[in-house]
Amino acid sequence: MGHGMDVSTLNTYNPTAALFGNTSSTSNSSSLGWMTGLNDLKMIQSGVYKKALKSVYDSEDSDAVKQAVSNTISKSGTTDSEKSLSNLKSDATSLYNASKELRNTNFDTASDDDIAKKVESFVNSYNKTLNDTKNLDSYSILQTQVWAVEKMESSESMLNKAGIKINADNTLSLDKDALKSADKATLKTLFGGSSSLADNINQKASALINQAANQISANTGRNLYDSSGSFQTLF
């Protein structure tokens, strides 16, 4: 006999709770029962999700479970509003520009005030982008945001040296005085050039821009790019 699992419960999967420490447990709690501890998308990325499903895949419910999981992912984001997605698109664009500016900074010659201004813009736009995803349900958007959060976490030690703290809800806090007194070599390693934190976040911001636009298009059936390839602002 099989596990007797009701695969229809997979369609209510909402993975935002673990990403944001202060979200409502009522709105973001999973009803999956057997997957309650797996609602963190970090687990999906790391492979824990697949390992947990393996025993189910091997059961007689295998095809039904696979289809339900596939449907859950493909349908995620269909209830996300145009305004929320457009706000994410706008803030992710700001993050893209801020991370690009920071990545291209010459830390050997830039003034402390100039660096502080660029880092503050980076932190603010990162926080806005992160907060925009709190009320979204798109699997691809949430997965990209988790990757961005993990990039921050992997650089936490150097961020602290630059006066940047990762808060409990994964937003960032900036101490400008600590930043201005930070070693320029540390800042250059952290933010400067390709493969730096700024470069990695720039790539994630670019992905979020496209994912938000694609989700709006999927939800509305409208092409949101004009003939020149530019995004058409909705709000």
Image: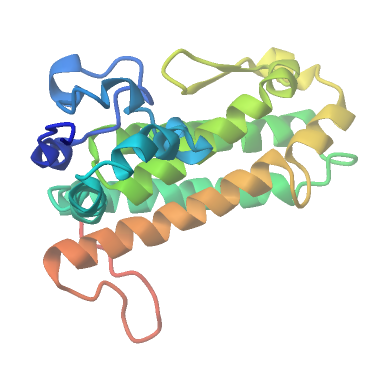
Quarter holding the C terminus is bottom left
Q: Is residue 177 above or below residue 131?
A: above
The image's colouring method is: rainbow
Please count the marks in the image.
0
Residue 111 visible? The answer is no
> Residue 52, can we see it?
yes
Q: Quadrant of residue 119?
A: top right
Above or below, comparing residue 13 to residue 98 in the picture: above
- Going by the picture, which residue comes out furthest to the front? 1
Question: In the image, what residue occupies the spot 34% across and 69% down?
Answer: 231
x and y percent of residue 202 in the render?
58, 50
**Considering depth in this image, is 94 or 48 the residue closer to the camera?**
48
Q: Quadrant of residue 142?
A: top left
Q: Residue 118: where, in percent of width, then height?
A: 64, 38
Residue at horizontal 73%, vertical 39%?
A: 191
Query: Quadrant of the rendered structure where residue 230 is?
Result: bottom left
What residue is shown at x 71% (from left), y 48% (from top)?
Answer: 103
